[in-house]
């Protein structure tokens, strides 16, 4: 396969970033990935081992807190996928730890694109967090929706994603940029990990086995497989007429449904929440208890309990030709991966389930 693209992936060692690198290499592109330090080989060993990496991948240092570090990384680059952004729910200083690096890092990458003079398109990894921070069962979300509710106290991670995407579009609104911008707005990313860690979204499944949730709560998540998100980025880059924002998600599953899928792939000795609190009384109790949680976790619960997201992904399906894996399959693949890497502890009781 002969291609003329040289693609920069920021945050290449991250959950999504690693899958972007793998997808791009599989499509025959030359890839340059940014890492915080090339001296920390353990952090990117999984990238070096990817098929095609020996001749198609190079890694360079860049950091969201050092804007000029992206200028050298952009040399000779034709397309950019900006996936680097902090993802944490609770922090003592959300302005410093979430909003500033998300916004300033995005602007630094955009500025480096403009200065390079070779970039044709940047695909920005945004999020449903830039669409809304409080699902509404009566409103179907589309790309026209913007999250205007988040603050430094209310869902600050959501604020960081909304602010970063807003800043990106404001930047592109100025004349003479010389390249175009497309954003992909995924819902909750899950799927097998390529790196050694556990992504924040996958951590939900780990937490369900570790007692972090004392009961089955009235939570519902719009899921999307990380492998599908990587494909969506590639299609957003490759499709000449791609423009604007693209909601990226598969199906919605409730916590009860997620637990049901997990139970099919875990031995009975792994404890999962079973006490039913996914009802009106349980939701009222959980919301009251949320005020005793850290700010990030507490505000998340208060804005999500008892709410089921509704969204329309017609645009990404029709314009980019995107299809999505069944979400239950993604949950199963994630559980099997977490168990195989020892991230979900499985007592040896001799009883296994399919894939367990």
Image: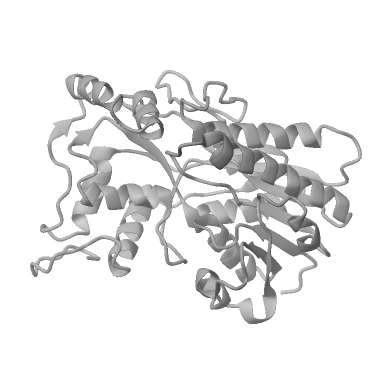
Q: Nearer the viewer, residue 19 or 12?
A: 12
Question: Percent x, y for residue 134?
Answer: 44, 25
Residue at image point 75% right, 56% down: 70
Looking at the image, what colour scheme do you see?
Answer: one colour
Lateral position of residue 354 relative to residue 123, left or right: left
User: Residue 238, can we see it?
Assistant: no
Question: Percent x, y for residue 310?
Answer: 44, 28
User: Residue 298, can we see it?
Assistant: yes
Question: Percent x, y for residue 233?
Answer: 62, 52
Lateral position of residue 15 relative to residue 261, left or right: right
Q: Nearer the viewer, residue 198 or 294?
A: 294
Location of the C terminus (image quadrant):
bottom left
Q: Is residue 175 above or below residue 62?
A: above
Q: Is residue 145 above or below residue 62?
A: above
Location of the N terminus (image quadrant):
bottom right
Q: Is residue 159 above or below residue 25?
A: above
Q: Is residue 118 above or below residue 327?
A: below
Residue at image point 72% right, 55% down: 80
Residue at image point 58% right, 47% down: 85
Lateral position of residue 217 relative to residue 110, left or right: left
Residue at image point 14% right, 32% down: 276
**Looking at the rendering, which quadrant does residue 53 occupy?**
bottom right
Question: Percent x, y for residue 121?
Answer: 77, 50
């Amino acid at each position: 396969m002969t291609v003329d693209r040289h693609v920069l992936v920021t945050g290449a060692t991250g959950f999504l970033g690693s899958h972007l690198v793998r997808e791009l290499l599989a499509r025959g592109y030359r890839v340059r990935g940014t890492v915080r330090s090339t001296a920390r080989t353990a952090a990117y060993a999984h990238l070096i081992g990817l098929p095609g990496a020996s001749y198609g991948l190079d890694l360079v240092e860049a950091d969201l807190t050092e804007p000029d570090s992206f200028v050298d990384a952009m040399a000779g680059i034709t397309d950019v996928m900006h996936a680097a952004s902090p993802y944490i729910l609770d922090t003592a200083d959300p302005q410093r730890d979430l909003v500033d690096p998300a916004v300033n890092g995005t602007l630094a990458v955009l500025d480096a694109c403009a200065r390079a003079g070779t970039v044709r398109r940047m695909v920005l990894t945004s999020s449903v967090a830039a669409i809304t921070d409080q699902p509404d069962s009566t409103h179907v979300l589309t790309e026209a929706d913007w999250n205007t509710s988040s603050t430094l106290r209310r869902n600050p991670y959501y604020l960081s994603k909304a602010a970063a995407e807003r800043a990106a579009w404001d930047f592109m609104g100025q004349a003479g940029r010389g390249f175009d911008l497309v954003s992909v707005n995924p819902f909750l990313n899950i799927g097998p990990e390529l790196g050694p860690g556990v992504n924040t979204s996958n951590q939900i499944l780990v937490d369900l086995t570790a007692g972090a949730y004392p009961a089955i709560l009235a939570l519902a998540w719009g899921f999307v497989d990380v492998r599908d998100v990587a494909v969506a980025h590639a299609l957003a880059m490759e499709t000449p007429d791609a423009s604007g924002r693209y909601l990226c998600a598969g199906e919605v599953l409730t916590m009860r449904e997620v637990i049901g899928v997990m139970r099919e792939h875990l031995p009975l000795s792994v404890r999962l929440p079973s006490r039913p609190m996914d009802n009106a009384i349980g939701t009222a109790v959980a919301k009251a208890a949320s005020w005793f949680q850290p700010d990030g976790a507490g505000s998340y619960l208060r804005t999500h309990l008892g709410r089921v997201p509704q969204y329309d992904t017609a645009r990404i399906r029709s314009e980019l030709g995107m299809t999505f894996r069944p979400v239950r399959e993604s949950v199963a693949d994630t559980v099997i991966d977490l168990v195989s890497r020892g991230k979900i502890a499985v007592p040896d009781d001799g009883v296994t389930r399919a894939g367990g």
